[in-house]
Image (cartoon, rainbow, N blue to C red):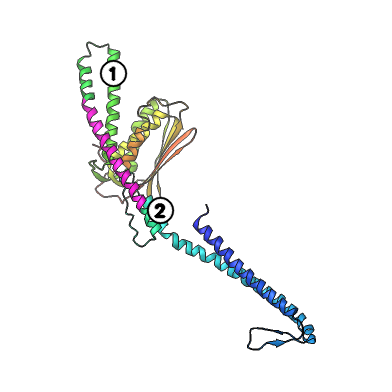
Amino acid sequence: MRSLRSRMVIGAAVISLGAGLMTAAFVYWRLGGWMIAPAGTSVDDGSAQSMPLTSQGVVDAVPALRQVRGSLLLELLPFVIGVTGLFLLLPVVAAKWLLDPIHELNCRLAAIDAVQPRVDLDFPEVDKEIREVIRHFRQILSKLTVSLEDTREYAAEAAHELRTPLQIIRLKLETSQAKIDPILSEELQEEVHRLRHVVEQVLLVAKAGRGRLTLQNSRFDATSLTEDVIEDFQLLATEEQRLLKWLEGPSLYIEADRKYFRQVLHALLTNALTHGEGEIRVKVREHRRKLRLFIGNKVKAGPGSNDLSLGLGLRVVKALLGTMPCTCFRRYSGPTTYGVLIDFSTVPPSSSVSKHPPVT
């Protein structure tokens, strides 16, 4: 189905072109009727009186009428084309005016946040058909909000319920080390630790989604903090015989929770170390008065070694970015490469902010 704008333009063009051609055809036919009028008859030219034509008058009038008809036709064609062009522009303006409510609706729907899918869809002056569409959107968003809240609440409760049994299992393993094979005990401890980490991550995502994280926002040098985290991960990359390349940019400040910003960097760099290979590139630069962070690496040919938490780290990153002045989050994935690009709104540096703030 063609768009509303296309249908209006095509319809107006066909109508105006048809009306113009019909007018030209009528004038052409009418002048032709005058030329073949028999002698002794009269031709009505629209005036109050008719013009009688003698045989000599017909002979004299035919060449003049033919010339007038040709000239009039040549004058009518540009007029028809001009009117058609005008009627092509009018539907474009009318379509824009008619589509303004839909454009505004799209803008508001695009502003829906995954953390809190609520948006103002009040359009009191729109047509009945658009009001019906808005009503259906409200119903869908209401159902999605209820379903999302139920899912988050269930995930949070499940994570809370799992924390105690895992703690008990860990304590029992520690007290029973003398009765269990040391290798088996170490493996069980690692699995319990891994499960506890997954439970903590699920609980963190659920809390962030419900807006229940306790934030301690402050103004800090994000470039410097990124460099501190990279220095730690460069040791891990060297141990795995990989290169972590840091492309340092200018000092840029953001206002967010320093601990969660560090956790975002940890999650992204851990993902690059676990599921990637080769060189890891980290870059911070200023882009349109924003801090732009890029982390990219090559992708392993086979599956990662930590399949249980595959994708969970990205969920944690998205949930934590929802608590920060993040304006853009994009992923670039290809057959052999993977990258993450994040933009943060910057703030002016404060005189009380140190370049290397302590991390608690």
Name the side, left or right, on which 342 lies relative to 169: right
Q: Is residue 145 magenta?
A: yes
Q: Residue furthest bottom?
A: 49
Q: Is residue 118 magenta?
A: no
Residue 118 position (above or below residue 61): above
Span shown in magenta: 135-164
Name the side, left or right, on which 177 lies relative to 135: left
The picture places residue 179, in percent across and down from the top left corner, at 22, 10
Q: Which residue type does callout 1 highlight?
A: Leu
Name the side, left or right, on which 322 lies relative to 95: left
Q: Which residue type does callout 2 highlight?
A: Asn
Residue named by callout 2: 106
Tell me what residue is drawn at x 29 percent, y 43 percent: 146
In the figure, residue 178 lies in which quadrant? top left
Residue named by callout 1: 188
Residue 285 position (above or below residue 105): above
Question: Which of disc 2 and disc 1 is earlier in sequence?
Answer: 2
